[in-house]
Image (cartoon, rainbow, N blue to C red):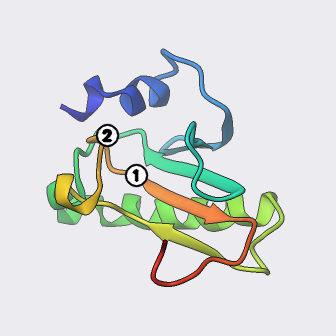
Amino acid sequence: MAEDTIFGKIARGEIPADIVYEDDDVVAFRDLHPQAPTHVLVIPRKPIPTLNHAVVEDAALIGRLFLAAAKVAEQLGFAEDGYRTVINCNADGGQTVFHLHVHLLGGRPLQWPPG
């Protein structure tokens, strides 16, 4: 279950992380293996394993994840230059921790497709 993941433990404050933003519903912290100069993970405190597990009642929470990502991009100074948000879903989609999370990447020009 998602609450047993490392992200669940970070959300509950059981293990430390470089937290850059938090509120009652969302925690954002720096990725330990950044793929860009700034790579932050934005997670809900509520354990949701994958995007496939989200239900209608989670719609506002998922919206708050993206609003928090935009706020973090502004706080860290790259919102105006631009950034990328990504959600991976399941193993073939690149998800390795099964607690829903948004990758916030910025701090340099990002190419598409990623590479």
Picture quadrant of residue 110: bottom right
Work out which quarter of the rendered image holds the N terminus and state it: top left
Picture quadrant of residue 72: bottom right
> In the rendering, at what x and y percent does residue 104 appear?
57, 61
Q: Residue at 24% across / 62% down in the picture?
A: 93
Residue receiving disc 2: 97
> In the rendering, at what x and y percent does residue 81 appear?
78, 80
Picture quadrant of residue 6: top left
The residue most toward the top is 14
| Mark 1 element type | loop
Q: Which residue type does callout 1 highlight?
A: His
- Say whether residue 71 is left or right of residue 31: right
Q: Residue at 69% across / 55% down in the picture?
A: 38
> In the rendering, at what x and y percent does residue 30 appear?
63, 42
| Mark 2 element type | loop
The residue most toward the bottom is 112
Task: Assess disc 1: are there few (<14), some (14-19) or many (≥20) residues with their C-alpha within 10 Å of its C-alpha.
Answer: many
Q: Which residue type does callout 2 highlight?
A: Val
Q: Judge whether 36 appears above or below 100 on screen.
A: below
Nearer to us in this view, 21 or 32: 32
Nearer to us in this view, 31 or 101: 31
Asked if the residue at tag 2 contacts the one at tag 1, i.e. Cβ–Cβ closer than 8 Å, the answer is: yes
- Say whether residue 47 is left or right of residue 11: left
Residue receiving disc 1: 101
> In the rendering, at what x and y percent does residue 22 appear?
61, 41
Between the C-alphas of marks 1 and 2, the distance is: 9 Å
Q: Judge whether 94 appears above or below 14 on screen.
A: below
Q: Residue at 80% across / 58% down in the picture?
A: 76
